Amino acid sequence: DAGITQSPRHKVTETGTPVTLRCHQTENHRYMYWYRQDPGHGLRLIHYSYGVKDTDKGEVSDGYSVSRSKTEDFLLTLESATSSQTSVYFCAISGSTGTNYGYTFGSGTRLTVV
Amino acid sequence: GESVGLHLPTLSVQEGDNSIINCAYSNSASDYFIWYKQESGKGPQFIIDIRSNMDKRQGQRVTVLLNKTVKHLSLQIAATQPGDSAVYFCAESASGTYKYIFGTGTRLKVLA
């Protein structure tokens, strides 16, 4: 989607290695989120940010950390990747203008841990 | 490929017919609801939203109905087209949280 980009789009990594996924937005939105999507579970919130250096845990935060040093970038790090973290990861942004408080999602990062 | 779900409930409809996709939500405090569409290999895309002070909202070819008594949402798509084939999610949120709970989704297949 215009205004939000995720990188990389695909990644294969080995168990035990660190991995960082990047989300970049050009909308100047305050809120940014990382979700993972797995069969049978839908979208589950990993971490979110409500401002620069302000982050909080979601429902599946174990094994993940995040950082937001500037408004436009939200990084998701897997400190030591495990096979259970093989998933599709989506970043989302949300603003507070207008009547639409929904998310705009990125195109996703498909991560495979082997 | 798409890893949205191998065992999603699937609704198959004939092209030109109307589609109805249902969703049960979990939190009685939720007051804002959204339907998203997710095509293969893409992120979810906003379709239509509704607030809890409404029972019905219409968009272009889509209508969302909200029944707060039984905590149920439905998405109606009129004159379903091949381009409507996708996975559809509902999402619920409570005021001020800016966080959503997503349903697991329904796959819509449009038959030519």
Image (tube, rainbow, N blue to C red):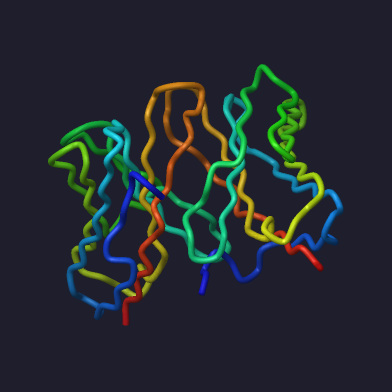
The C terminus of chain A, quarter of image? bottom left
State the residue in front, B17 or A20.
Answer: B17
Q: Quadrant of residue B71?
A: top right
State the residue in front, B3 or A29.
Answer: A29
Q: Is residue A61 left or right of residue B41?
A: left
Residue shown at 39% from the left, 60% from the top: A108
Residue shown at 28% from the left, 38% from the top: A49
Q: Position of residue B23 (x, y in %)?
A: 70, 44
User: Number of marks in the image?
Assistant: 0
In the rendered image, the vertical position of residue B29 relative to residue B60, given as above or below: above
Q: Quadrant of residue A71?
A: top left
In the rendered image, the vertical position of residue A93 relative to residue A84, given as above or below: above
Q: Position of residue A73 (x, y in %)?
A: 21, 45
Q: Is residue A67 left or right of residue B105?
A: left
Q: Residue furthest left?
A: A69
Q: Position of residue A94 (x, y in %)?
A: 38, 35
Residue shown at 38% from the left, 68% from the top: A110
Q: Position of residue B105 (x, y in %)?
A: 63, 54
Q: Is residue B31 left or right of residue B83?
A: left
Q: Quadrant of residue B58?
A: top right
In the rendered image, the vertical position of residue A39 relative to residue A72, given as above or below: below
Residue shown at 28% from the left, 32% from the top: A50
